[in-house]
């Protein structure tokens, strides 16, 4: 009702200034994701996707393969479960149940969204070379990219006021990029799968943070 009243009094240009930044960010991310998904459906991104994967393939070696598989497993089901339990244990010991609720909502929603979106788009995985690892689910959006980025985005929001936030930002962004690269190196995802995963996870975590804040439970406080 407040937005409607603001629109009536100030018009559209006045309304957008009253919208919270988180809502504007969420809306922009969803628009970009929808545009990307549409281009993927039309196979407009395929030449770019294939070219990037073939360029990365030249760096394959037995030693690198082992390192990449170990790295990518940190954002797999078992690796992510261990990391999440460690975060939840840390928050529970501090009796910070407000952040526990936010973290579970952000991560749980990310996993559910990934399952739904994979079934919705049903994009087949790349088959450009003999697979180093075998993945049986659909390709878009990348589950590893979504999980790793949702984890980092959630931590950055929860500890936005921490003295160590700059170190967390540096390490977190590096982790997201590394996990994304491992999925491309292994040939189990297209670059646009990774980008789509990042977009939708950031949109979801932003929405959850916005809703918690609207109800007086800002996760960064």
Image: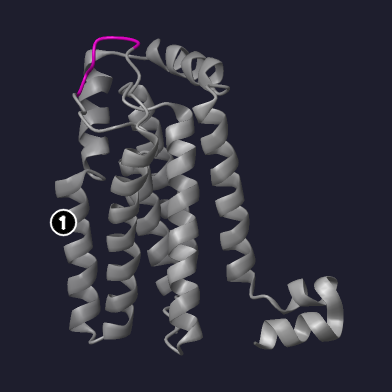
- Which residue is located at x 69 percent, y 82 percent? 3
- On-image quarter of the N terminus: bottom right
Q: What is the magenta segment's predominant secondary structure? A: loop
Horizontal side of 23 relative to 102 (left or right) equals: right
- Residue 26, compared with residue 114, is above or below; it is below
- Residue 174, compared with residue 10, is above or below; it is above
- Residue 194, compared with residue 16, is above or below; it is above
Q: Give the percent coordinates (x, y) of residue 62.
A: 22, 14
Quarter of the figure with residue 128 = top left
- Residue 104, compared with residue 148, is above or below; it is below
Q: Secondary structure at mark 1?
A: helix
- On-image quarter of the C terminus: bottom left
Q: How many marks?
A: 1
Quarter of the figure with residue 74 = top left
Q: Give the percent coordinates (x, y) of residue 78.
A: 14, 48
Horizontal side of 107 relative to 36 (left or right) equals: left
Q: Which residues are magenta?
A: 128-133
**Mark 1 lies on residue:** 82
- Which residue is located at x 45 percent, y 87 percent? 215
């Amino acid at each position: 009702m407040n937005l409607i009243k603001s629109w009536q009094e100030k018009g559209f240009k006045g309304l957008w200034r009253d919208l919270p930044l988180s809502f504007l960010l969420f809306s922009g991310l969803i628009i970009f994701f929808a545009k990307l998904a549409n281009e993927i459906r039309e196979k407009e991104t395929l030449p770019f996707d294939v070219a990037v994967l073939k360029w990365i393939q030249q760096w394959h070696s037995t030693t690198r393969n082992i390192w990449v598989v170990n790295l990518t497993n940190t954002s797999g089901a078992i690796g992510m479960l261990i990391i999440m339990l460690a975060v939840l244990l840390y928050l529970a010991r501090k009796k910070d149940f407000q952040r526990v609720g936010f973290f579970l909502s952000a991560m749980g929603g990310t996993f559910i969204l990934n399952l739904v979106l994979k079934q919705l788009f049903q994009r087949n995985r790349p088959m450009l070379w003999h697979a180093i690892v075998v993945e049986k689910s659909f390709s878009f959006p990348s589950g590893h990219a979504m999980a790793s980025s949702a984890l980092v985005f959630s931590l950055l929001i929860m500890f936005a006021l921490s003295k160590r936030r700059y170190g967390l930002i540096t390490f977190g962004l590096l982790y997201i990029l590394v996990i994304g690269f491992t999925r491309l190196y292994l040939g189990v995802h297209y670059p646009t799968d990774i980008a789509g995963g990042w977009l939708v996870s950031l949109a979801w975590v932003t929405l959850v943070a916005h809703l918690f804040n609207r109800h007086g439970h800002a996760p960064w406080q």
